[in-house]
Image (cartoon, grey):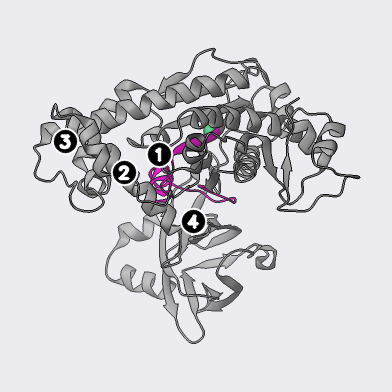
Amino acid sequence: MRKGVLRRRLLGGLLALALAVPASGLAASIDNLRLWAAPDHARLVFDLSSPAQAEVFRLDDPRRLVIDLQDTRLATDIERLDLQGSAIRRVRTGIRAGDDLRVVLELSRAIEPRHFTLAPNEQYGHRLVVDLEYPGESAVEDPIDPIEAMIREQEIAADRAQAEAVAEGRDPASVAAVLEPARPHPKRDIIIAVDAGHGGEDPGAIGPSGVREKDVVLSMAQRLARRIDATEGFKAVMIRDGDYYVGLRQRTRIAREQKADFFVSIHADAFRSPRPHGSSVYALSQSGATSETAQWLAASENRSDLIGGVDGNLSLDDKDEVLRGVLLDLTMTATLNDSLTIGGQVLDRLGRVNDLHKSRVEQAGFVVLKSPDIPSLLVETGFISNPDEERRLRDAGYQQRMVEAIFGGIEAHFRRNPPPASLLAWRRDQGRDTAGNEYRIQPGDTLSEIAARHDVPLVQLRQANELEGDVIRVGQVLRIPRS
Ligand SMILES: [Zn+2]
């Protein structure tokens, strides 16, 4: 609060206010600045010694965002803030009106600002949060091809039409014929949404030696995405690909926007005592699914997105609420069945990498699992609160084995049940499923690592590809011999 204002208010007889705000120690200090850069926004957090009044506004030519903090002083080195990946080019500060601090962000692009204050919690004290949203920017770095998205939408529409037929007691086969994918075969990729839990100001669980869940799960998610992209017929979409937070609802929204066939969320468990250990796999619980169905019905914008149909012909607007509920239930149940099947496949393989905390696929009402139309799993890769597993979670070899187990389960399911328009379905129909025996080389790969990953002796891998030495190039496709 500005002193001039305070004086006026005191003169106005607002003594109570003056008593509530002691005259000494009035000034807040900025003790730290933190920045999280996401593809569609940046979040700048001011850690404050006490709450401060802020005014935030934009200026043009050149583009700037001004943050005026009343009675605030700077107690941190602003130069230390890493601006990389954000729209902020430079940060300047100056003192205004004696005690006020002006922070100016020089910007490289148009932004939509938003700000709010947060009261202290377990981890942080008073905070001022300034979000810079980038209009027209996707939340994911590498959105899927619009044509693939269209094909996938047609498939979703076909599924829905079949469910509708079942609900109305008609023969679903009659619907399928009409909605068969257009020729030539689209051979689309199967889209796997990879979600690294937590991020940004939410570190997740923290291990006894300080390892943060958000870091190890991001590292595993990135490995998983690389593994998926290296497999022909599959494509990964990262829900977050950096150290920033994405809201839980936003995570499933991104997956739906990206037309994901499957959603997997990577986490690490924690408990108060260091003893519990092992990996576990979660799907949504049926009761969670049921209540969520109700929630979906309530939210009209979600509803229109979900069952409004793609081409208008499939709109359910004219159906009554009961039928709508039945259709959602059918979708949810089918999705949950797929989740449990894939979960079983993943769990089997995880059991060969680590002890299992729970020997069955567990079911719970996690928000990120509540997409009615995308089979979803949450994998707890280990207990970060267990010193032994904390160490393993950081280990590159362990991370890669985890990733192989997770993808192995997903891949096995989709090879057996490929979506109709997918490359895998086309391959199966052609009777030449060779994709499993090929590997496209990614940046950073080495031949020995590829051999180890596919469980083939290096010599055999060299022979199968007529390689003399160990020189390989990115994009080269290797034949993986059966060992
Ligand atoms: Zn977690």
Q: Is disc 3 surrounded by few (<14), some (14 to 19) or many (20+) residues within 10 Å?
A: some
Q: Which mark is residue 420?
A: 1
Q: Quadrant of residue 323?
A: top left
Q: Quadrant of residue 467?
A: top right
Q: Which residue is mark 2?
A: 180
N-terminal of the two: label 2 or label 3?
2
* Quarter the N terminus occupies: bottom left
Mark 2 and mark 3 residues within 8 Å of each other at the beta carbon? no
251 left or right, relative to 332: right
In front: 445, or 141? 445
Residue 288 lies, in percent from the top left, at: 32, 26
Q: Which mark is residue 143?
A: 4
N-terminal of the two: label 4 or label 3?
4
Mark 4 and mark 3 residues within 8 Å of each other at the beta carbon? no
Q: State the separation of the CA atoms marked 1 and 3.
A: 25 Å
At a point 81% along the width and 44% down the height, the residue shown is: 446
Q: Report the amino acid beneath label 3.
A: Arg
Q: Which residue is mark 3?
A: 324
450 left or right, relative to 257: right
Residue 334 lies, in percent from the top left, at: 33, 27
Helix, strand or loop for disc 1: loop
Say whether residue 50 is visible. yes
Relative to 221, does residue 73 appear above or below in the rendering? Answer: below
Q: Which mark is residue 224?
A: none
Is the shortest distance between ligand 1 and the CB of mark 2 under 8 Å?
no
Q: State the separation of the CA atoms marked 2 and 3.
A: 24 Å
Front disc: 1 or 3 = 1
Say whether residue 291 is visible. no
Front disc: 4 or 1 = 1
In front: 470, or 134? 470
N-terminal of the two: label 2 or label 4?
4
Please report the bounds of the magenta region as a residue range.
238-266
